[in-house]
Amino acid sequence: MATRRPAILAMLVLAAGTSAPAQIPPLPTPTSAVPILQEIVATQAFEERVIQYVTLHRLLEGPLPQLWVTRDMEHLQMSVRGLALQIRTARANAHQGDLLRPDVAGLFRHRIATCLPAAEWAAILADNAAEAEDEEGMPAAPPALHVNMVWPEEVPFGFVPPQMLAALPRLPVELQYRIIGSALVLWDHHANLIVDFMPDAFAVLT
């Protein structure tokens, strides 16, 4: 019996040594965390660029005469045009994509496409397009857009679904998300200026 006990113990040790690695599951590959981190980084960078613009806006708007409740539309328009002129001058070298850069544009397209069913988006965009008419009452094609242009007079302010607003980063009070054709627009409604825009933001939905 004394000679068999060490042999049995040795067999148990060998068996434990060969089976132990199989009992430890492999660590999962953290691939799902990578897109989330990229979204966070892109969103924070976009929000920082928005803050930079709004800071400039407020510095330029502050010294201007304050608006008051009035029916004098010419007075209101003069104030808006004065602010727009100063912002255009300060951002003379601005280009499309300065705020809506490719990293955040891809994120926005994904959120836009998933915040509503495609059929609902098609109906919204069709209704918005039907509201834009030319001088003969026919549906008008969306105008060419560029940064620092005023909101086109021939383009009505179409419906912007609240689901999209909830899906995108919140904007300061000076800015709004708007839709022109298939483009997502950042509009400064105090100065009536298009600050930036994202072409074909809705193209895949139509």
Image (cartoon, rainbow, N blue to C red):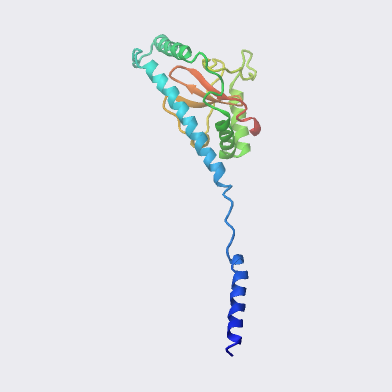
Say if 67 sits above or below 47 in the image. above
- Identified at 38% across, 20% down, the residue is 58
Find residue 8 and report its horizontal and vertical position in percent.
60, 82
Give left or right: position of 140 versus 158.
Answer: right
Q: How many marks?
A: 0
Front in this rendered view, residue 51 or 187? 51
Front in this rendered view, residue 88 or 71? 88
Front in this rendered view, residue 57 or 82? 57
**Residue 55 placement: quadrant:** top left
- Identified at 59% across, 58% down, the residue is 26
Front in this rendered view, residue 173 or 141? 173
Find residue 118 and report its horizontal and vertical position in percent.
63, 37
Give the position of the C terminus as an image quadrant. top right
Whether residue 190 appears in this view of the structure is yes
- Identified at 53% across, 28% down, the residue is 159
**Residue 86 placement: quadrant:** top left
Find residue 204 and report its horizontal and vertical position in percent.
65, 33
Whether residue 162 appears in this view of the structure is no
- Identified at 53% across, 42% down, the residue is 36
Find residue 188 and report its horizontal and vertical position in percent.
46, 21
